Image (spheres, rainbow, N blue to C red):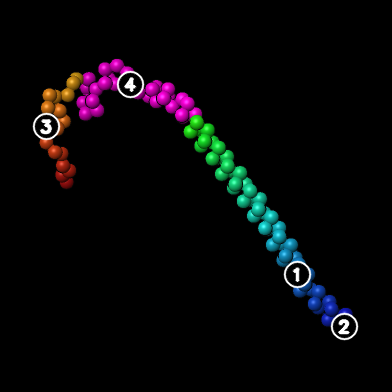
Amino acid sequence: MAAVAAGWQLPWRALAALGRELAAEWAAQDVRAALCQLLLLWLGISLLGVRLAWRAYGGAVAALCYRTGPAGRRSPGTASGASPSRDGPAAEPMKTHRE
């Protein structure tokens, strides 16, 4: 009878070991999920900070990027500082791609 009882204990011990292994893996997954949540929270707070900083200082930063003087006032179609022709770009023929 003792041999039969020992025979039944072995699968239960293996099953208990498997349960402990699954519990450890579950705990590891919880740590990963918490780490992912923490990183997403950090990303969200960082983006919110950038948004608030841009709202406060965006105009000043954008003003630094614009050219001033005659080069800043010319139209984008002109290569030099000279003013565009009287008819403007609308008088130019339609440009097409040729192979």
Quarter that holds the N terminus? bottom right
Left or right: residue 1 compared with residue 35:
right
Left or right: residue 76 compared with residue 85:
right
- Residue on which the image places disc 1: 14
> What is the distance, in whole Å, between disc 1 and disc 3 at their CAs?
86 Å
Classify 40 as above or below 26. Answer: above
- Where residue 13 sits, quadrant-wise, is bottom right
- Residue on which the image places disc 2: 1
- Residue on which the image places disc 4: 67
- Whether 73 is among the magenta residues is yes
Amino acid at dot 2: Met
35 or 49, nearer to the observer: 49
Under circle 3, the secondary element is helix
User: Are the residues tagged 2 and 1 within 8 Å (C-beta)?
Assistant: no
Q: Who comes first in sequence, dot 2 or dot 1?
A: 2
Tell me which residue sits at (50%, 31%) in the image.
52
Please provide percent x and percent y for residue 49. 53, 33
> What is the distance, in whole Å, between disc 4 and disc 3 at their CAs?
28 Å
Q: Residues within 10 Å of mark 2 (few under 14, many from 20)?
A: few
Nearer to us of marks 3 and 2 is 3
Amino acid at dot 3: Ala
- Where residue 73 sits, quadrant-wise, is top left
Tell me which residue sits at (14%, 24%) in the image.
85
